Image (cartoon, grey):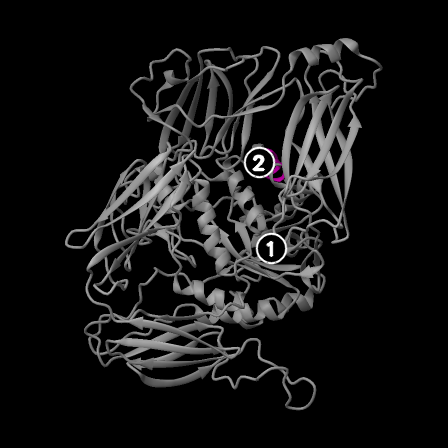
Amino acid sequence: MKKVLIFGFLFCFVTCIAAQNITRNVIRFDTGWKFFLGDNSQAKEGIFNDASWRSLNLPHDWSIEGENLENAPGAGNVGYFPMGTGWYRKTFDVPGFKKEAKYSIEFDGVYMNSDVWINGQHLGKYPYGYSGFSYDLTPYLKSKGNVISVRVDNTQQPNSRWYTGSGIYRHVKLVQTNVLHIEKWGVYVTTEGATEAEAKVKIQTAVINESKTSAGNNTIVKQVLRDQNGVQVGTAQTPLTLATDANAKISQEITVTQPSLWSVETPVLYTLETTIMVGNRVIDLIKTNVGIRHIYYDINKGFLLNGKQVKMKGVNLHHDGGAVGAAVPERVWERRLEVLKAGGCNAIRTAHNIMAPEFMDLCDKMGFLVMDEVFDEWEEGKRDYTYKIYYKDWYEKDLLAMVKRDRNHPSVVMWSIGNEIPDQSSVRGPMLAKTLIDIVKREDNTRLITAGNDNIASDNNSATDEYLNVFADEIVGYNYADRWHNRRELIYSIDRHEHPTWRMVGTETGGLGGLRGSYRIGNNSDKVEAFYGPRIDTEQRWKFTINYDYVIGDFMWTGIDYYGESRWPSRGASSGMIDNCGFPKDGYYFFKSIWMEEPVLHAYPHWNHQGREGQIMPVIVYTNCDTVELFVNNKSYGQKRLEFPRQGASGGWNSYASGKVQTSTADLHLEWDVAYEPGELKLVGQKNGEQHITVLTTTGTPHAVRISVDRNTIKADPSDVAHVIVEIVDSNGRVVPTAENKVKFEVTGAKLIGVESGNMMDLSSPKSSERNAFSGLCLGIVQADKAGKIKVNVTSDGLQSSVIDITAIQ
């Protein structure tokens, strides 16, 4: 960094800047691309005939369009999808082109090993598929006939342990700025110590002067903070004096009285307008969402948000969006997050790489706490061609890409530098961890840092004491804390005793998973096999997590099913609490029953078991009701009761603050063994004096297709979609839980961009217009590129069809 010089009156500079009248202009650069699947060394040239190439818009993932094959090079790691090499080209003009301006192209993510050329000039190579990066186009750009070429090489397989997608799968922007401008990710905002009475919003702005003239005299950096209604609540301005080809960091502060604090329940966002001005002219302007909040990690009370303890009820999420692959429209993520939020989830771990910018924005707006994670490995790898190849040369750049981009997000409350890192047991592990921590601290000292450690107390390759001690002043992250020996019962308590000052969080823990609506009852005609699963382990761990304040929280594996980490003929992992259509599974209701006060009364399995009459069927109930009675065809199987946490006496011996429940189990679920007979299974629950009823009914055979949509009006924009939910119902309108009828989508006025059913064993294309329903359900995703009326017609041979109308607006 060059030394900042102070100058007096610089009339020439002020006049030149004013004459240029150049400010920041961010242009969406997603439309009008050409694509070729394969390799062509001539495609980098500006003069090249790409007329035969496919026309498409970004974001784009070519892998999701391909066929799942058992011999795919990436195998089950990537869900048996094809990868390979692809080329993208875009020919474009620059309206209002100014030679004296700065131009750059920004990629939010390209998977992977991308090379970029502009007009035949190589700009650079970027290996990591999850980082955002940019290139300066200024020396090579012209007003008309520019050609940008991008080669994406995802041939070396396996390079991941889950589905990555291939291509320019995130957004691209063309950015014009003045030669005097705010650096990329150059605005840094903190709100430490914020209270309901007052908050000091501290801002650091990195400015660079790439002109041939020094900046000074009448040049200022101005900050304006506005509340959610656009009302100005504070301002600050500082004179700027900056030598040519130099940069500086300007520190400013705005005091806000009686701020609306950002929280999980009320995720209020302010808008900060950072402006460079010369006289009355705006030279640069960046808007930043700001959440005013205070976070603190206490060794005894866990995580405190605005002075109040908040238990992190978290899930791990991979970056694919089901049927749309890795190119995920914002609305797909929004709907998925809505379902998670409705189930009581308040925290997300970005497993195990940098998520898209719009995902982070949604977490801010919707009130999620985020553990922001960057790497799945460091020097020692887990597969042949993974990040270990690039770590030495790229780790700092990729880590900074995450921290600088995401440090203004109020949702980000914790950084994670790695997941299940093999180096945790190596001699170099402590040094590597400390190096990464130091880099993060240099750029952001307002959050603590962790890593997901899977070998704490393992029998082999256990995390070393030296490695774990690196996190002693940060947060020790546990992957499957209850995995090893007596830790199944004692969990964190052993380390709490030996390391009483450690802060602890369950970075990754077991969930309930399984295929939605699929139950292992066996093929024995005489008896039903019990379907147990990991219920007890999960329940006991959550009892511990909730009861012990020092445990910051728990991030369950996983929130949503994802492609990859599979065995043939499955193309994905079914560990989620919701499937990859966004449909809740049974386990979703377990977590909801302990995460929320809202009454929950959910039973499984379904009640369609033809040929099993008279056999003993286990009925599992997830509930937070005090008492539940089960009836089959109006015959009572008795009342059962649970209470968590159980009350202790208060006020006197054998006296209780509220009606004590005489519990029939210490587990967090209820269970009956019932002789199966077709008809009606009814649950009657009581909670706080109110009655709640859930009914499972033996349905008839499939009769009709019924469809609904999450929203009847969508924007004609790539970020927006409509989710068309398909149900196979009987003649009484009841969903048939065993139905697997093939359904066909016909869409007019828009396009169908994906179909899924949640069945990872169904290898038909997510880009097809038809798919078999699974457990009675199926999903289609519709996207519009123009305003107008959209009609969706869904048919199935032998069943009544269904039509729904959607409106697309500009």
Residue 65 shows up from this direction: yes
**Residue 500 placement: quadrant:** bottom right
On the image, numbered disc 1 is attached to which residue?
A: 264
Residue 696 location (% of width, % of height): 32, 71
- On-image quarter of the N terminus: top right
Reply above or below: 126 against 67: above
Q: Which of the two discs, 1 and 2, labels the residue nearer the N terminus? A: 1
The residue tagged with tag 2: helix, strand or loop? helix
Residue 668 location (% of width, % of height): 48, 74
The prevailing secondary structure element of the residues shown in magenta is helix
Q: Which residues are magenta?
A: 395-404
402 inside magenta stretch:
yes
Q: Residue at x 33, y 38 (%)?
A: 789
The residue tagged with tag 1: helix, strand or loop? loop
**Residue 327 placement: quadrant:** top left
Alpha-carbon span between mark 1 and mark 2:
29 Å
Left or right, residue 529 beside residue 378:
left
Residues 424 and 16: in front is 16
Residues 653 and 810: in front is 810
